[in-house]
Amino acid sequence: MKFSRFFHQSNDLDVENRAPKGSAKKLDSIKALALFFAAITIFNIFDIYTDIAEKKGYWHLLDEALIAIGAAGSFLYLVSKIKRQAASLATQKGELDRATQEVLNWREEAAILRSGISAQIEKEFTKWHLTEAESEVAHLLLKGFSLTKIGELRGVVEKTVRSQTHSIYSKSGLAGRAEFSAYFIEDLF
């Protein structure tokens, strides 16, 4: 049994392919509404020209003109809102990209540190002449697993794990679990 199956790297924090999608959808809705008001404006301007040619009444032309002006104003307002939203979305995307890069850099640095710590731990285990089984148990002890859980993970009874832990403490010259854990953690602080 490979002990590495107990020590896989967790990727709970997924920083890939993230984008502020809600803002993008809202922006698309605003664009559709702006196009709607643009169409109303164009249609009403065309209608005003045909009404002038047909010599429609002054009040009717005024109604059509007010509708065209209102639609054109709404269109211009929405265009400015689209520009602001696009700028805000670009800023958010830039901030997200920077934060994503920071997380990726941190993960890389943490992986380097973990590999260094793991190498030092392995050196100590080799120096103590731990067997492969004892080494697996020692790693699981350092991760904080109970003797019962270690037995379950390794497919052995708790009594076997207890015997292996006594052997680990004996070979290392450490008094027990607390001293064993402190031996490796002490130099980190």
Image (spheres, rainbow, N blue to C red):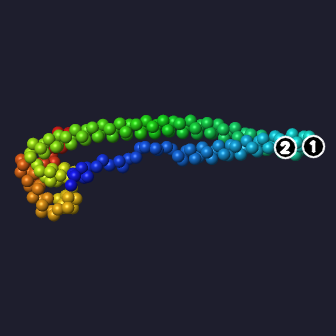
Image coords of residue 149 (percent x, y): 21, 60
Kind of residue at badge 2: Asp
Quarter of the rendering occupied by the C terminus? top left
Image coords of residue 163 (percent x, y): 9, 58
Between the C-alphas of marks 2 and 1, the distance is 10 Å
Q: Is residue 39 visible?
A: yes
Residue that label 1 marks: 54
Kind of residue at badge 1: Glu
Q: Residue at x 21, y 51 (%)?
A: 3
Residue farthest right in this picture: 55
Counting residues from the start of the chain, the first of labels 2 and 1 encountered is 2
Observer-nearest of 113 and 156? 156
Residue that label 2 marks: 47
Which element type, helix, strand or loop, lies under badge 2? helix
Q: Residue at x 14, y 59 (%)?
A: 161
**In the drawing, does residue 16 fall left or right of residue 5?**
right
**In the drawing, does residue 21 fall left or right of residue 39?**
left
**In the drawing, does residue 68 fall left or right of residue 109?**
right
Q: Residue at x 50, y 39 (%)?
A: 92
Observer-nearest of 58 and 41? 41
Image coords of residue 14 (percent x, y): 40, 46
Which element type, helix, strand or loop, lies under badge 1? loop
Q: Is residue 62 visible?
A: no
